[in-house]
Image: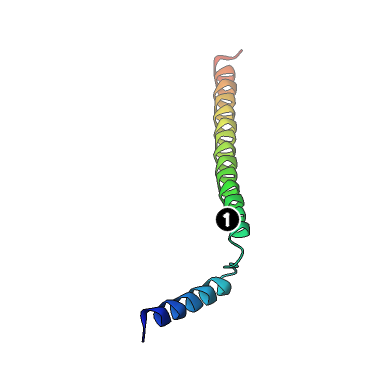
């Protein structure tokens, strides 16, 4: 088997493997655009989760402070 035959077999198998996972080997520009979009979506979703956790923590802290304030008013008879 010549090196050229090995290269050809490897290329065919690579193309088949990429096709099996839904990637078009011949349209690399489209694949790069899709991967760039996927990257942006990952960054956006991570940011949304971070903001949601921050808001949830703010609500919890505000609720605890409100409960403490109410308890203090009740205890001191204001």
Residue 22 higher or lower than 34, as above or below: below
Q: Residue at x 58, y 36 (%)?
A: 51
Percent position of residue 45, x then y:
59, 46
Q: Identify the image's colour scheme: rainbow, by chain, secondary structure or one colour.
A: rainbow
Percent position of residue 61, x then y:
54, 29
How many numbered markers are drawn?
1
Residue 62 higher or lower than 10, as above or below: above
Instruction: Give residue 21's quadrant in the image.
Output: bottom right
**Outermost residue to the top:** 78
Residue 51 higher or lower than 6, as above or below: above
Q: Residue at x 60, y 57 (%)?
A: 29
Towards the viewer: 13 or 69: 13
Q: Residue at x 59, y 17 (%)?
A: 73
**Outermost residue to the bottom:** 1
Instruction: Classify the position of the C terminus by image quarter.
Output: top right
Q: Residue at x 59, y 14 (%)?
A: 77
Instruction: Classify the position of the N terminus by image quarter.
Output: bottom left
Instruction: Give residue 63's quadrant in the image.
Output: top right
Dot 1: element? helix
Residue 20 higher or lower than 29, as above or below: below
Percent position of residue 53, x then y:
55, 39
Q: Which residue is mark 1?
A: 32
Percent position of residue 32, x then y:
58, 55
């Amino acid at each position: 088997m010549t090196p050229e035959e090995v290269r050809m077999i490897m290329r065919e198998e690579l193309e088949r493997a990429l096709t099996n996972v839904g990637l078009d080997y011949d349209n690399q520009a489209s694949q790069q655009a899709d991967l760039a979009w996927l990257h942006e979506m990952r960054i956006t979703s991570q940011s949304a989760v971070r903001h949601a956790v921050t808001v949830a923590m703010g609500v919890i802290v505000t609720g605890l402070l409100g409960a403490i304030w109410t308890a203090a008013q009740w205890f001191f008879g204001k």
